[in-house]
Image (spheres, rainbow, N blue to C red):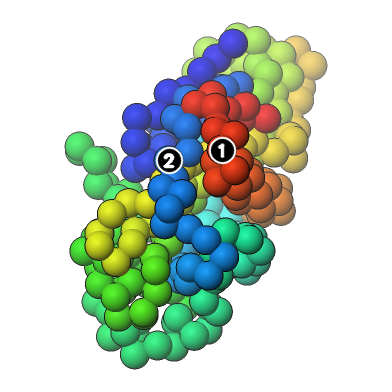
Amino acid sequence: MQIIRTYSLTLTVIIGVLVSGCAHMAITGSADVDKNSFGAKKRFAVVSIASMKRFQGEQGIGQKFTSDDNIPGMNTQPIINKLDQKIIQALGSSKYFTLVPENKVLMSKAYKSLAEDEKVIKVLFISVPMNVANNYKYVSDEKKYVQLAKDLGVDGVIGITLNFTVSQGGGQFNLGPLSLGKKSYSAMATITAIAYNKDGKVIWKDSTMKEAEPGDSKAIVLIDTSNMTDTNFEKLHPSAIEIGGKAVDVLLARFDDTMVGKGTSSFQSVK
């Protein structure tokens, strides 16, 4: 069994930079929820929905010499824009808090006047550019989360971050661009949630990773030279949207389980 271990929410997000999504299990830690901070009458606002700007994972040889911005379908902006409402609907369906309508948050004076943080995630020597969904702003500074909670008059604010990876399966032996055996490609989504209350306390943090069924299969019976051709990132968009929605559902299910005292496992199946 292959296992990925993640040590923090930020590392969970950038894990796709380091691996191609080939693990069967991920160690993300159990959901961390302050149950006393939630309740049906508690009001929460989603203030940031973001994703890493590009798909992570295998590229064709020719693509390695091309700017990522010029590779069709590699930019995740269309994916996160379509997942926006799925995320809001999922969070809005929770019986453990009341979600402030998205439009009311985005059109508020407090949100409009907010100075957006630089759209990057920085860990050690890695700097990863970010996208934000539709009319959202990128918020990474915890002080801004706390100030927004106060300015919006809510009990807490939530930030959602995603990452999309190309997962490779098969290929029994690899030597440079050549590989023996059949290979398949699918999309993997990593999603994290973090919530702060007005006092600056982190009251919810969790992450999950889910892989779609193979959506793009490339196979030559004896020698697979697909690494020499371009990876069709556009073809992976539908499965990325689908698995991103499933990852949101898993995240909320883990939150619900914690609220009723069931607890959650630190080990999560990627499939």
Image side of residue 35 versus residue 189, left or right: left
State the image coordinates of residue 197 (x, y, percent, origin top left).
33, 62
Q: Is residue 230 visible?
A: no
Q: Residue at x 39, y 68 (%)?
A: 155
Q: Quadrant of residue 230?
A: top right
- Give residue 165's quadrant in the image: top right
Helix, strand or loop for disc 2? strand
Q: Residue at x 43, y 23 (%)?
A: 5
Position of 209 with respect to 53 (left or right) is right
Residue 21 seen in this snapshot: yes
Looking at marks 1 and 2 on the same chain, the residue that comes earlier in the sequence is marked by: 2
Position of the C terminus, as image quadrant, is top right
Image point 34% across, 36% down: which residue? 8
Residue sitting at x 34%, y 30%:
7
Decide: is 47 above or below 210: below
Q: Amino acid at mark 2?
A: Asp
Residue 208 or 211: which is nearer the viewer?
Answer: 208
Observer-side mark, 1 or 2, equals 1
Query: Three-letter amino acid code at disc 1?
Result: Gly
* Circle 1 SS class: loop
Quadrant assignment, res 85: bottom right
Residue corresponding to mark 2? 32
- Residue 261 is marked as 1
| Mark 2 surroundings: few (<14), some (14-19) or many (≥20) residues within 10 A | some
Between the C-alphas of marks 1 and 2, the distance is: 12 Å
Q: Position of residue 261 (x, y in %)?
A: 56, 38
Q: Is residue 233 above or below residue 96?
A: above
Q: How many marks?
A: 2
Name the disc covering residue 8, or none: none
Q: Position of residue 39 (x, y in %)?
A: 52, 61
